[in-house]
Amino acid sequence: MDWVVVGAQWLHVLLGIIWFGNSLVVAAILIPSLNPLPIPMQREVGSRYGERATHLFDILVPAVIILGVVRGTLLGPIKDVGEVLGMPYGITWLVALIAVIATFLWGRIVINGALRRMNDAAVNPDGTATVQLEAETARVKLVVVLELVGFLVIFTCMILMRFGV
């Protein structure tokens, strides 16, 4: 047994689970739990959570990507550039790599941008949500849930690669 391969795979999977698990928890637990709260409170909790998550995933996701590249190439079946498009595993690996980068950028650009717009939206003088704040809050919820599409592609590719496809 090659312990370097085992270690790289273990860390790659663990970090990926943390990232994917966060997205699932936010969509399935956090957002529904916040929905009954007043929008200004949703904004406060969401912005704090988003700030902390951004710091974590700015380190974790590049590590997942680097480990995936290493695992597929140096420690895996892809030995030259021709094999990326020349074998089923290589094509699946490339799709996964593109999906991971796109999903990460979705979070950094689209989700963080939506969070900034939500945080910049004014509240009414009595502290209640303005129409703009309600709209921006709804947009944050939508783009967070849409991130799951990227994870569906990534997860499917991981399963396929396990079987050499």
Image (cartoon, rainbow, N blue to C red):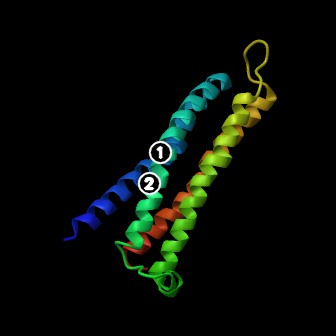
Q: Secondary structure beneath disc 2?
A: helix
Residue at mark 2: 63
> Which label sits on residue 22?
1
List x then y, in percent, for residue 86.
50, 87
For image coordinates 79% across by 18% down, the residue present is 124
- Vertical arrangement, residue 45 with respect to residue 22, above or below: above
For image coordinates 46% across by 82% down, the residue present is 80
Q: Residues within 10 Å of mark 1 (few under 14, many from 20)?
A: some
Mark 2 touching mark 1, by CB under 8 A? no
User: Which residue is nearer to you in this view: 94 or 82?
Assistant: 82
Q: Is residue 119 left or right of residue 131?
A: left
Alpha carbons under labels 2 and 1: distance apart: 16 Å
Residue 10 shows up from this direction: yes
Residue 115 position by quadrant: top right
* Quadrant in which the N terminus is drawn: bottom left
Q: Nearer the viewer, residue 38 or 164?
A: 164
Q: Residue 32 in the image: state x and y as whole percent.
A: 56, 36
Q: Residue at x 57, y 60 (%)?
A: 101
Give above or below for 22 relative to 117. Answer: below
Quadrant in the rendering for residue 31: top right
Crowd class of label 2 (few under 14; some 14 to 19; many from 20; radius 10 Å): some
Q: Position of residue 85 (x, y in %)?
A: 53, 83
The residue most toward the top is: 126
- Could you tell me the amino acid type at mark 2? Ala
Q: Is residue 146 visible?
A: no
Query: Which amino acid, by three-letter code, is at mark 1?
Result: Asn
Q: Is residue 49 above or below residue 27?
A: above
Q: Quadrant of the C terminus?
A: bottom left
Sequence-earlier tag: 2 or 1: 1
Q: Secondary structure at mark 1?
A: helix
